[in-house]
Image: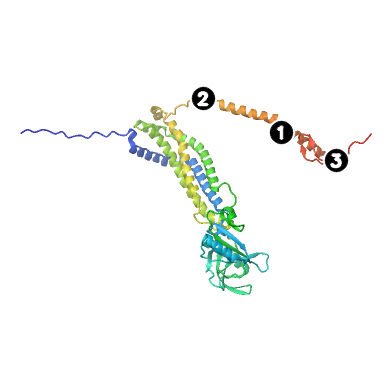
């Protein structure tokens, strides 16, 4: 009987990733975070600039977007609006045609009434509070909506003008109604009206019909039809676009300032970064430390700026509602601008730290451990762009002088007109090509007569 030994197969070793892989990156990121927590006071200027830029952008965009009046004050949730002046014998037929063509419509009757003892007027409005399109145009502040022929609800300003309150009797046009509530148009607090139930106005002076006509222009429907696009004021540039463009310019300037700050911080950490390289860190890891510091600084500034903007918005919103004369949601912030501002803040800080990160890896390990910075290398800049721009400027000046209407000629004509005004001449329009005023001669000097 013979025996044999069977060798146990040893698995081949897994080659380690160059640079340490993900564990090395996590270790470097943790070390960068510890450095930021220890030396964040050295970056207060960059943090303050980023925080102020993000907060100002968010708050400015929120104010600029929320201040203009909302079209919901007249359109509600509809996209089209038709206005008919009453009395009109064809009114019912026109409303029925709109209903047949576009589906559900909402009819609002209006009658203009004068305020007793005043030249001002108000509207008596018949509208369904829970209407399909006009529900956004009504808000109940006290009491309840009118539900019958003997009930009415007034806006707060109109009730104060008429000296009425909830439960009072209001007599108008020979009809007595009980005030059941205080209402308002949340999209236009200057809108003063008295609300009655639908069908309670016998002789309306104007009838408004709300409906949706997708894909059609008002010109194809009639002169009395208006849509959201035609009612919106012309504004070629969206306030959000302006805010983001200003933020981009501001972040570029902040990045230029932050680049110098990150360079100084990298020089202060030169010995620590040299020790990191001495224990086996690659140039990529060292660059990651500096860039991670920039990213963390940008993220901290973005979060602080967003928090400051939200706090400022909550404090300023009531005053903005009073000046804009319409209700504004508590968190009706331009969230696209908020996200863009925070992302741009991180990108700007990361980009500002990229150049110092590349420069610090060119320092030898021995020089980094000694703490002595490497002397700067001489830079060789080309003078060709500057010479080309100077030549272009001289050529433009030469063309301006050769055109014959240079500033010297205008100055000579202006001097002559000034001397004529001092002598009392009624100078007319000045013509530089004739060298003097083109008005009529003075009354005391006529054309020379015969000798």
**Dot 2 corresponds to which residue?**
380
Q: Quadrant of the C terminus?
A: top right
Q: What residue is shown with label 3?
A: 442
In three-dimensional space, the C-alpha distance between marks 2 and 3, rounded to whole angstroms, equals 69 Å
Q: Secondary structure at mark 2?
A: loop
Disc 3, SS: loop
Label 2 Cα neighbours within 10 Å, binned few <14 / some 14-19 / many ≥20: few
Q: Are marks 3 and 1 in contact (CB under 8 Å)?
A: no
Residue 436 location, x and y as percent?
79, 36
* Badge 1 element: helix
How many marks can you see?
A: 3
Q: Is 358 situated left or right of 222 in this image?
A: left
Mark 3 and mark 1: span between their CA atoms?
28 Å
Please tell me which of labels 3 and 1 falls first in the chain.
1
> How far apart are labels 2 and 1 at the CA level?
40 Å
In the rendered image, residue 190, in percent from the top left (x then y), is placed at 60, 60
Point 45% across, 35% down: residue: 354
Residue 150 x/y as whole percent: 57, 74
- Label drawn at residue 322: none
Whether residue 336 is situated above or below residue 212 in the rendered picture: above
Residue 438 placement (x, y as % from top left): 80, 38
Contact? badges 2 and 1 (CB < 8 Å): no
Colour setting: rainbow
Residue at 17 percent across and 35 percent down: it is 8
- Mark 2 or 3, nearer chain start: 2
Q: Quadrant of residue 272?
A: top left
Tag 1 residue: 407
Question: Which circle's residue, 2 or 1, is located before the other in the chain?
Answer: 2
In the foreground, 369 or 386: 386
């Amino acid at each position: 009987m013979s025996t044999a030994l069977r060798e146990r197969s040893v698995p081949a070793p897994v080659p380690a990733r160059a640079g340490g892989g993900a564990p090395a990156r996590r270790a470097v990121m943790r070390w960068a975070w510890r450095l930021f927590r220890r030396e964040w006071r050295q970056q207060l200027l960059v943090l303050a600039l980023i925080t102020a830029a993000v907060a100002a952008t968010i708050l400015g965009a929120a104010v600029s977007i929320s201040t203009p009046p909302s079209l919901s004050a007249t359109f509600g949730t509809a996209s089209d609006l038709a206005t008919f002046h009453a009395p009109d014998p064809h009114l019912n037929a026109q409303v029925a045609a709109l209903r047949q063509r576009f589906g559900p419509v909402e009819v609002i009757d209006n009658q203009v009434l004068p305020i007793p003892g005043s030249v001002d007027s108000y509207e008596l409005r018949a509208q369904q509070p829970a209407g399909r399109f006009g529900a956004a145009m009504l808000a109940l502040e006290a009491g309840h909506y009118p539900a019958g022929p003997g009930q009415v609800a007034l806006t707060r300003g109109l009730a104060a003008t008429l000296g009425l309150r909830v439960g009072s009797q209001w007599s108008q046009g020979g009809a007595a109604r009980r005030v059941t509530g205080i209402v308002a148009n949340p999209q236009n607090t200057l809108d003063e009206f008295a609300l009655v139930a639908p069908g309670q106005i016998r002789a309306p002076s104007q009838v408004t019909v709300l409906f949706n006509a997708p894909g059609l222009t008002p010109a194809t429907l009639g002169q009395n039809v208006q849509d959201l696009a035609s009612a919106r004021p012309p504004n070629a540039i969206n306030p959000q676009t302006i805010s983001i463009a200003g933020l981009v310019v501001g972040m570029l300037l902040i990045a230029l300032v932050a680049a110098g700050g990150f360079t100084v911080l990298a020089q202060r950490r030169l010995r620590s970064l040299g020790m990191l390289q001495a224990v086996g860190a690659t140039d990529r890891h060292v660059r990651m430390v500096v860039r991670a510091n920039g990213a963390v600084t940008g993220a901290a500034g973005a979060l602080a700026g967003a928090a400051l903007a939200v706090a400022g918005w909550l404090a300023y919103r009531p005053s903005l509602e009073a000046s804009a004369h319409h209700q504004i949601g508590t968190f009706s912030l331009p969230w696209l601008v908020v996200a863009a501002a925070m992302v741009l803040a991180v990108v700007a800080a990361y980009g500002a730290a990229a150049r110092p990160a590349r420069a610090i890896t060119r320092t030898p390990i021995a020089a980094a451990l000694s703490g002595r910075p490497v002397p700067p290398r001489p830079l060789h800049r080309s003078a060709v762009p500057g010479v080309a721009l100077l030549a272009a400027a001289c050529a433009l000046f030469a063309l301006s002088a050769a055109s014959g209407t240079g500033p010297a000629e205008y100055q000579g004509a202006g001097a002559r007109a000034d001397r004529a005004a001092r002598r009392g001449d009624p100078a007319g329009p000045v013509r530089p090509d004739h060298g003097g005023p083109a008005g009529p001669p003075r009354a005391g000097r006529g054309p020379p007569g015969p000798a």
